[in-house]
Image (cartoon, helix red, strand yellow):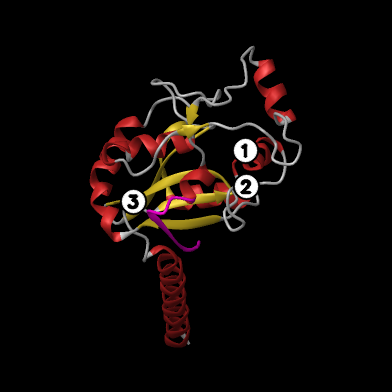
Amino acid sequence: MKRILRKSSLLQLFFAVCMAAVLCSCRSSRVADLKDGDLLFVTAKPTGLSGAINNVTQKQAQASFDHIGILAWYASHPYVLHAAPEGGSQKQPLKDFLKDQSDDGQKVVVYRLKPPYRTAIPAALEKAESMTGKPYNFNYILDENSYYCSDFVERAFRENHIFTLEPMIFVDPITGKTNEFWQKFYKQKGLEVPEGQPGCNPNGLAGSEKLQRIREL
């Protein structure tokens, strides 16, 4: 009887180990093809700050984003270097980053620099890591001491001129007037809407001809 019980326990342990290995393999295969320097774009929500960002920046039907980060591998573990309202500029484990987006009902789409531009990645990752620890820029006006998400990414690749700053636009494309959300947003801060000032946004970066869309995570 003891032998039978021992065999049963060993079989259960064997199947548990096999199942864990299968699950681990499934999880790793989800991200196994990701590369250093891949850009992770987060889909925009239809309302609130997310919707307001997308309203005045969307350029392509297939690109509707409100956040972006840079993927980097450290000791075989994937992380995301990004600037977010919660935590500021940070290095976050990819699994936590993906969970945060999933909890908010948002998806993540991978873009990758085309081969001629991939030599810019090592310097960009080094620059991005040097910027971690800085606070988030809640005014979305360029500042050397705080960063917002696309600003963080543009700065990381700036040395190799991968992205460019463009005049910011806060005009609703339907009404032709300054978006109401942004009017209230800057009024509450005691600031003028920074129309025309240099800046960048996730949709603008996604529209770069130097990138190719890979897949949704």
Specify which label sits upstream in the sequence, 2 or 1: 2
Query: Is residue 41 rendered magenta in the image?
Result: no
Q: Residue 133, percent across and down?
A: 38, 28
Dot label at residue 37: 3
Q: Find the residue positioned furthest to the front.
A: 176
Q: Is residue 186 above or below residue 74?
A: above
Residue located beneath label 1 in the image: 53
Residue 44 shows which numbered tag? Answer: 2
- The amino acid pointed to by label 2 is Ala
Query: For the residue labelled by badge 3, is the local secondary structure a helix, a strand or a loop?
Result: loop
Q: Are marks 1 and 3 in contact (CB under 8 Å)?
A: no
Q: Residue at x 28, y 53 (%)?
A: 117
Kind of residue at disc 1? Ile
Q: What's drawn in magenta, residue-wise?
A: 207-217
Return the residue found at the far top: 190
* Residue 210 picture location, percent across and down: 37, 53
Circle 2 or circle 1, nearest the eye: 1
2 and 1 marks in contact (CB < 8 Å):
yes
Q: Amino acid at mark 3?
A: Gly
CA separation in Å, label 2 and label 3: 22 Å
Q: Is residue 40 left or right of residue 193?
A: left
Residue 83 shows up from this direction: no
Q: Residue at x 29, y 43 (%)?
A: 125
